[in-house]
Amino acid sequence: MPKHRLYQPAFAFLTLLALGLSACSTGFYKKWADKETYGILRKKASKVPNSGQAFLDITPPPPVRMEELRKNMKKEEFLGDRAYLEENARVVSLAEALDYAVHRNRTYLVQKETVYLAALNLTLVRQQYGPIISGGGSTTKASTDAITGINNLVRNSTLTTTGNLGFSALTRTGALLATNLTTNFVRFFTGGKDSGISQLGFSLAQPLLSGAGYLSASEVLTQSERSVLYAIRTFAQYRKSFAVDIATQYFGVIQSRETARNAYLAFKAFDFVVARETAMQKENANSTKSSVFRLVQSRIVFERSWISAIRDYEQALDDLKVNLGLPVTERIVLDYKDKDALQIIESPGTLDEAISIAMTNRLDIWNLRDQVEDTSRRVLIAKQQALPSVNALVNYNMLDNPDHNDFRLVPGNKNYSVGLNTDLNLNQKPERNILRSSIVAEQQARRALDLFEENTRSDVRTGWRDLQLARKQYELAKLGMEISTQRLEVEEAFNAEGLGTAINLVDAQRDMNTTRNLMVSTTINHTLVRLRLWRDMGVLFIEKDGGWVDVLNKEKPKGE
């Protein structure tokens, strides 16, 4: 069998391989990308507290299933004709709300995808510093028609098929290595000796001054590696704020519901008093209608407040559903056990200790400190780039034997070259500007870090003061509740005996309603202020489902 026939199966195999690679399914590419990207994320996330690969999974969540949640079997009178909205609705606790949020909140998912894309981009940058294979070819058939003599048509046809296979690699010293194999396949099929030649080439380009060395040559890779770490830290810090925001909105809905309930209680109280006063007026012909009118007018005001409070509660609940990634048409009611479980807790330690903890644990501060290092590194690179360009060049090509029709590279048939490529870089203005800009960027980065550290100290100081204030507000609300309860009892007793005035009863009932709302709001506010302080200190560790972990183990409810 002629030798050139041996190459036909090989050529066919290479062709089919190329077509197969080009026809790879989307699923294959997804698995390929995910395997490499998640590998990077696992390794990088291990260096970031409270961040892991499980938190960074961007797999779309399954459809919402609320069947596993218990139903609310209670019908609340204070909701009036809107009570049906809560009857048989699914009960969602704070833990379940956080779990829904971290898997379905649209903004949260975008943040996770941003981290994934940073790691995906790193896979491409890493490839630039490793062997890159390339291959291709072309097939051309050319025909020429010529008339010679009388009615004599001569047609010349030429089939040219070329192929090449190459490898290239950019090393971390700045050297570019390349290998390329080219050949003309027609010679293998036709056995011709004049259709072209094959060759195997090697080339090396190594910068000696500008662009030389690990620092400059690997800058793109270095920055990409660090950018992935920054993205993970940013996301880990974002998760803390996100959990606090969801908790704030969750308790805000509970507070809106309690406001509606308190408004209803105030309205019903006036409804009872109005009925009693009307009956007393009929029995006492000497009494005036002024007190009854005032009570009726106040009842109307409280009824309006009650109806508005129900509307505000429904709107707050719909807004929460959107942030949890639940359909707004889904009927839910929040678990009031979370409100009843709230405790007034004092943070341990001192303000100075809290600031010190924040400066150590805040991940966004870590990022800014590392970014200062980035700008300092770029200054050094800019200085090196201002040097003249001197590149060492080496080329070596091994050729085949043109007198044979098979693929046979002959070491003796070669050409090579060694030389230097120099650019004196006499126009220094671009490099001057880059260097000066790098120095300015470093100054700006240091100032940004300093400002952020000061703002963090300020945030912790503010949070600490807010926590003390929230404690005092709760104590005052508790005291006000006792006074309002006693006052309302006295005014109702006086009114029942005909000794009190309508205005005093109205004021007492209004104050009682305000105090009820304050008791709820101050309890919730103290919890949220404490969570925000933990967040600002960088000690609010988040579970996979979005719930937080109390890392301040010394915290105890006051009095314990």
Image: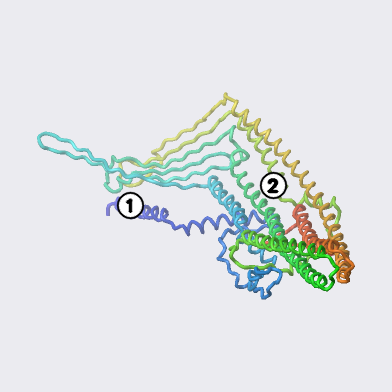
Question: In terms of sequence position, does the residue under pointer 1 or pointer 2 come before the other?
Answer: 1
Is residue 521 in view from this perspective? yes
Q: CA distance from mark 1 to mark 2?
A: 57 Å
Q: Are marks 1 and 2 in contact (CB under 8 Å)?
A: no
Between residue 500 and residue 371, name the one nearer to us: 500
Q: Residue furthest top?
A: 426
Between residue 228 and residue 87, name the one nearer to us: 87
Query: Mark 1: which amino acid?
Result: Tyr
The quarter of the displayed image where residue 41 is located: bottom right
- Residue beneath label 2, please? 367
Residue 393 percent coordinates (x, y) = 50, 34
Between residue 140 and residue 179, name the one nearer to us: 140
Q: With respect to residue 108, does 150 lie above or below? A: above
- Residue at 69% across / 47% down in the picture? 367
Foreground mark, 1 or 2, reads 2
Q: Which disc is residue 7 wearing?
A: 1
Query: In what quadrant of the picture does the N terminus appear?
Result: bottom left
- In this picture, residue 480 sits left or right of residue 186: right
